[in-house]
Image: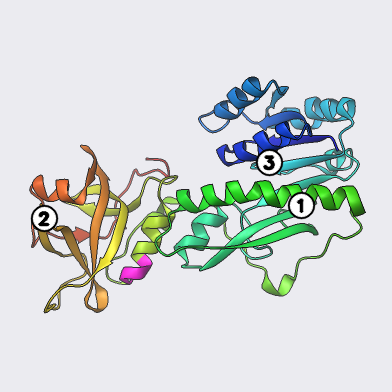
Amino acid sequence: MKIILLTGGLYSIPVIHYLSAQKLLHSIVSPGKANKNNIPIELNAQHLNIPFKRFLKEELNIGFKDWLTEAQVDAVFVFGCPYKISPTLTALPKFGFFNIHFSLLPAYRGKSPVFWQIKNGAQTGGITIHQVTENYDDGPMLMQHEISIAQGESLGLYTNRLAMESVQVISKGIEKLNTTGNDLLFPQNENNASYFAAPVIDDLKIDWETQSANEIENLVNATNPDYGGAVTQFRGLPFRILEVNLVQVNNPSTFIPGSIVHSDVNYGVIVACKETQFLRLNVVQFTEGIFSGFKLAALGIAAGEHFENAANLSGLTINS
């Protein structure tokens, strides 16, 4: 089988190395302008001596079409493409285009499915390989593989596990295509469908009064590292939290959610949440840099101070 990999994401690199080692990879195509995610893909292609092409959005239906026509590949696997792919392109390979999506479709259709799964406290996710159709994430499925989400696992850690597991899932998918072609693709169950748009800055904000300690921990994990941490406000300024864990407090009193109830260099910074639950801040980021909770205490953040909801903060961006 001869394959083109259409990818703009770092998490496709294990698959690149696998397909190259198996002599299946005709070329790698990256959509859009050069950026921090796709430049390493280009460098890996150079290292493996795999042809690499970059097409801007407006070039996909011309330049990429010509590239596909000349290549005469059996399939295109898509691993992170922000643009809708036209039927003119998907009809060119023998078996079509197949998208690798990090959820158990049809649940969590849309962009950033891992963010939403972790934020929502899902205990199970997975990998779906489905045929690309005119609508996002709704084509018949080639393969689906369930993968549990560990307690406290961040977006980065879980996505890296998915990337490594993708190698075996794609390997089995290729074997299935070689054996049965598209005859055994199976439909998605629309009764289980859900869709989530790409996160916006408000989705990253902590609401100390309404969110439980578990919900805040899930949000923090969902934002690490791609979104730079969950957003709160401290001393009137934006404050990002990258790692927390639930802790027990002896003889707990009732505190206003967001209150710092303990701060020292031995136990770090502990914050009250609603329903008499408490979180220890393990890793944070603010104007001066990224710090451990223990360093935060040494910097003078003291018990009795208060984190505030970030609802009124303006000027923040998703990548800040």
Residue 59 visible from this viewpoint = yes
What's the residue at 82%, 26% (across, down)? 67
What's the residue at 46%, 48% (across, down)? 156
Q: Residue 80 carries which label?
A: none
User: Label 1: which residue?
Assistant: 172
State the image quarter where residue 137 is shown: bottom right
| 214 in magenta | yes
How was this image coloured? Answer: rainbow
Mark 3 or mark 1: whose residue is earlier in sequence? 3
- Residue 226, given in percent of the width and then of the height, sits at 45, 45
Crowd band around label 3 with a 10 angstrom C-alpha radius: few (<14), some (14–19), many (20+): few
Determine contact: label 2, label 3, CB under 8 Å: no
At numbered mark 3, what does the secondary structure look like: helix, strand or loop? loop
Q: Distance between the residues labelled 2 and 3?
A: 50 Å
Q: Which amino acid does label 2 sit on?
A: Asn
The label nearer to you, 2 versus 3, is: 2
Q: How far apart are marks 3 and 1 (CA)?
A: 26 Å
Where are the magenta residues, as a range? 211-215
What's the residue at 42%, 65% (across, down)? 151
The label nearer to you, 3 versus 1, is: 1
Q: Which amino acid does label 1 sit on?
A: Lys
Crowd band around label 1 with a 10 angstrom C-alpha radius: few (<14), some (14–19), many (20+): some
Q: Which of 82 and 297 is in front in this view?
A: 297
Q: Which of 58 and 266 is in front in this view?
A: 266
- Residue 33, given in percent of the width and then of the height, sits at 60, 27
| 135 in magenta | no
Residue 94, above or below 31 = below
239 sits to left or right of 223:
left
User: Label 3: which residue?
Assistant: 83
User: Label 2: which residue?
Assistant: 266
